[in-house]
Amino acid sequence: MTSVFPLRPYRVKTFGFRGMWGQIYRVEEGFRRIGCMIAEDGEDFDFIYSNELPQDRDAVMCKAATGKPLIRHVHDLSAYEGTPFEKEPAALHTYRDAVISTADRITVNTAFVAGQLARYWDFHDSIITEQPMQVDPDLDGYRTRRRRNLAVVVGRLNDPLKNTKLVLRALSLMKAPPDLAMVWVGKSKKVPRSTFRCFKIEHHREIPAPDLAALMKEARMVIAPSLFEGLGLPPIEGLALGTPCIVSDIPVKREVFAGVPVSFHAPNDAADLARAIKSLLDNEDEGWHMVDGFAPKITLYQPETIAAKICAVYEGLKTG
């Protein structure tokens, strides 16, 4: 495993999304935890780190102005493999040359995304660094913690790739469905009010990471039914907070949860998801085995681990 501390404390110039769910904040927190500093405008720095979208150019412009090396993080390519929305390879080349030609190193979330870059961009040198959880882990007393009879689903209800409607269909098949806390990002005016009444949904249009963590900690389970992800943090965060998870059986989740007895469900099978929900409700120990099995992997997704890996990438650049 990469050392938590770099060879020396670096000063890093960062670029990325800074909204409520901006991963760049947590990456910056990781740098600070290992003794590095975040460069302000006008300050000198050692290297640039960016997890901007491929079309964003701020980091590229900074590199052109300063000549400092750029480590560019690619979350995933929106190929949507294995879904009804799968794209043609040519559609994924729009930003290929701009990203590859300007980055000194490219990092990615998972081996799945590294495979995407190899398949669609013919790029074979990406480095897996993962990305940080938005919250710090907390397994304190997780087996005896007071919980509500809730299932937390993170995702936009009308986004077919998040597949959250499958949860509603699964619950409708159950004789005694649990209450459902569904965390939605964005507006829900197209959703019939009867949906809320039928499933006792708690709607959070936007929810800060600490509030989502509190919701997860008191829930019976986290359900992650998405059809496509480059990583997918909610089930990782749920397990790190001591809450069992049910996840869709897609390649990236098989990679992330390899060796962990999480409950997988067929991505388009509401009956199979209903089975998984009922099994977890009926067998509490099944859930605790999931949490215990994932515990050794938690450190992989902590900010200081990701920051240390990024620094190691930079140190590799310096040594050739």
Image (cartoon, helix red, strand yellow):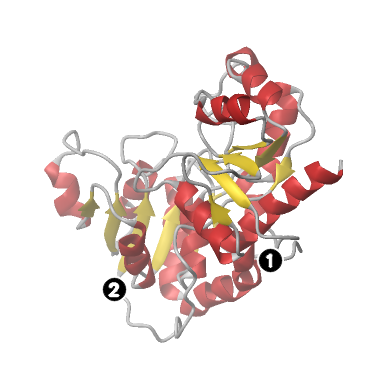
Q: How far separated are the C-alphas under marks 1 and 2?
A: 37 Å
Residue 137 pos. (x, y %): 49, 70
* Vertical position of residue 243 compared to residue 61: above or below: below
* Residue at the disc numbered 2: 148
* Disc 2 residue type (three-letter): Arg
* Residue at the disc numbered 1: 4
Q: Are marks 1 and 2 in contact (CB under 8 Å)?
A: no
Residue pictured at 32% horizontal, 77% vertical: 147
* Disc 1 residue type (three-letter): Val
> Mark 1 or mark 2, which has the lower sequence index?
1
Q: Along the line of sight, which residue is nearer the eye, 221 or 177?
A: 221
Q: Secondary structure at mark 1?
A: loop
Can residue 142 be spotted in the picture?
yes
The mark closer to the camera, 1 or 2, is 1
User: Is 127 situated left or right of 216 in this image?
Assistant: right
User: What is the quadrant of the C terminus in the image?
Assistant: top right
Residue 42 pos. (x, y %): 49, 39
